[in-house]
Every structure is written in C-alpha cells, then in structure tokens.
Image (spheres, rainbow, N blue to C red):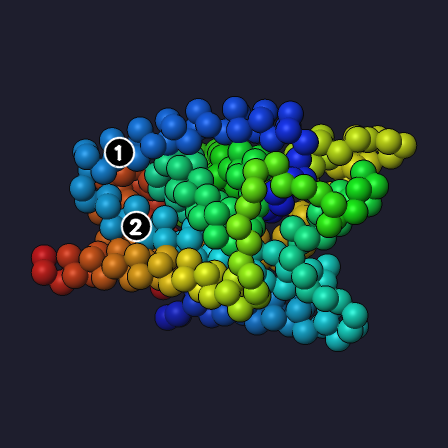
Amino acid sequence: MKYQFEIIVGLIVILFIGTFLYTSSINPDAEFGGSDGVGSAVVSELTGIPEDDVKPLIPQWAPPSGEIESGLFALQAAFGGVILGLGFGYLIGQRTTQ
Amino acid sequence: MHIMEGFLPPLWAAIWWIVALPFVIYGFVRLKQTIDENKDALPLLGICGALIFILSALKLPSVTGSCSHPTGTGLSAIVFGPFITAIIGFIVLLFQALFLAHGGLSTLGANTFSMAICGPFLGYYVYRALKDTKINIYITVFIAVALADLFTYVITALELALAVPAGEVGFIGLFITFLGVFAVTQIPLAILEGAVLALVFKYIVDIKPDIITKMKIFSEEQIHAARGKIQ
C-alpha cells in the first residue's frame, strides 16, 4: 500500500492530539507550563528556597517578554528548517542529475 | 529537560561540566574529520543537525498537563554517532542558555550531559543492538530515537535527584519524584518523535539509499527488505 508509513505516522500524530484534547478537557486547570518550570518548582519545594530567591550562578540574559522568547524560538526552528530544506534539496538535486 | 540557571549547586554544576566537556571536545574533532573526509555526508549532517534545532524548539503539551520538547538527537546519533551529536546538541543548548534563558551557563554541563550525551549514546547502542537483527530498519530507528529522547529526561531527573538534599524521602524517592515530572511527561513526545524521525529516515533512504549503505548504517539487503514491506 502506498503511503502506508505516512498514514501510520499521521495516526500517531492524531492520537497525540487526541490525548492532549482529552487531558485538557478532564483537567481544565492544567496550565501546560514547561516541565522545566515544574521541575524547578519541585526543587524549590524540597530545598525550601522560593524559586524567586534562587540566584543564578552565572548572570543570565532573559528575554524581556513571552513574545520575544517565542520569536527567538521561532528563529531557532526556522534556522533548522532552512538547513533541513537545503540538505534534502541537495540530495534530491543530486539524484535527478545522475 | 533544561535545568534552570542556579538550580544546581556549584559543585554539581562543575562536576557535570567536567564530565560533559571531553565528549564535546572529542565530538568537535570527529565533526571536523567527517567534514574533511566525507563530503558526501554533508547534506546528511545538515539534515540530522537541523532536526535537533527544530525539534528542541518545539514545546508540546503532554498528558501530565505540562509542556516539554523532543530532543531530535536520535537520528544524528544513529547516522553520525554519539560524539558528533554531542557537539551539535551542545551548540543548541548554548543558544538556548544565552538567548532564551532555557537552562543556563552553569547548568549547561548537566543539560549537555543529558540531552547531547546520554540520550544519543543510549540511542546509538540500541541501534547497534538491533541493527543486525531481523527487525525492520524503520522500526529500529523508531525505537532508538524514542528511547534516546526518553532517556535524556531520565538523566535530567537523576541529575536533580543527586543535587537536592535527600531528606526523609531518600535518593530513590527523589529520583521517582523527578521521573514523574520529566519522564512521564516525555513518554508521548518520545513516541511521536520516534515516528516522525523514522519517517524522515525513510525519505533519506528513498532518495539516496547508497549513502546509507556507504556509511554502513544499514546493509543493502536490509534496505531492500524494508522497501518491499513498506512503501
């Protein structure tokens, strides 16, 4: 069967979205924050040091807003996308010229 | 899987830096060698590296009600080995520490150890173990990639459990707590990543099977067998 693999992966993606919709519907309070942040919260709870009091060992620049942060994440993914396209484009081009 | 800046005590931050650094440096040497010696592999290196950039930027929701991101390191570990993957992963994590406040410079050693070293190494050895069995090559890639992703988060949990004073729950109790935060969230994402990267690998095999056999990633017979079954 053609596209058998694509269909399997598509089903896994649909299943993934399905579990997300299900968990967010049975648990409307879920914040879907980063697990990094949840991990940090657990550390704070265990050590008794509030998260805001944890001092960086090495000073760090943080994106001033969520918008800027998501922009930089998009930039990271876009850079990857360009290289991915270049790599596949090169392979496909090589095949057609041979 | 990022441990945030300041969340590891100086001693552990230093230990993980010392552990991670040799892998990254040797990875850099191997990367240079590969680029110099095997020009044919460059587009493939681009694809594998790019996937780490893309997938580690995607934060996806999971069953635990929090978000996490895939690592993308598995395919690179299979094709180029864990050392080259270590340097690529390090570069991604450095970018995130400098510009995104995801992870930090002091915890970069620990984050590199989990995402760029332990995950890829496990993925690589799973691939090696399954490589010469009768298992379909795409299934092998799926399993190796998914386990590399999941194992990254197991190591993050371990790093935090070691760094936090154990108290009454003890080390094992701490480890299980952090596994609950990181690894359980990661299971659906690991399955998704495994499936997507296996598909990407199939496209590479479809377009240029000779580079896969030339780099001895899989044999011609294995590719042939897999193509017969899956279109």
Which residue in the protein does label 1 denote? Answer: B32
Q: Residue at x 83, y 41 (%)?
A: A48
- Label 2 marks a residue whose chain is B
Q: What amino acid does circle 2 point to?
A: Gly
Residue B147, position as x, y percentages in the image: 56, 44
Query: Which is more toward the observer, A7 or B70?
Result: B70
Q: Residue at x 19, y 33 (%)?
A: B37
| Residue B74 seen | no
- Label 1 marks a residue whose chain is B
Q: Are marks 1 and 2 in contact (CB under 8 Å)?
A: no
Residue B104, position as x, y percentages in the image: 56, 43
Q: Is residue B140 left or right of residue A15?
A: left
Q: What amino acid does circle 1 point to?
A: Lys
The answer to which of marks 1 and 2 sits earlier in the sequence is: 1
Q: Residue at x 72, y 52 (%)?
A: A38
Q: Residue furthest right?
A: B168
- Label 2 crowding class (10 Å Cα cut-off): few <14, some 14-19, many 20+? some
Q: Is residue A38 left or right of residue A88?
A: right
Query: Please, what secondary structure does the residue beneath circle 1 have?
Result: helix
Tell me: residue B121, above or below residue B181.
Answer: above
User: What's the mark number on residue B46?
Assistant: 2
Q: Are marks 1 and 2 on the same chain?
A: yes
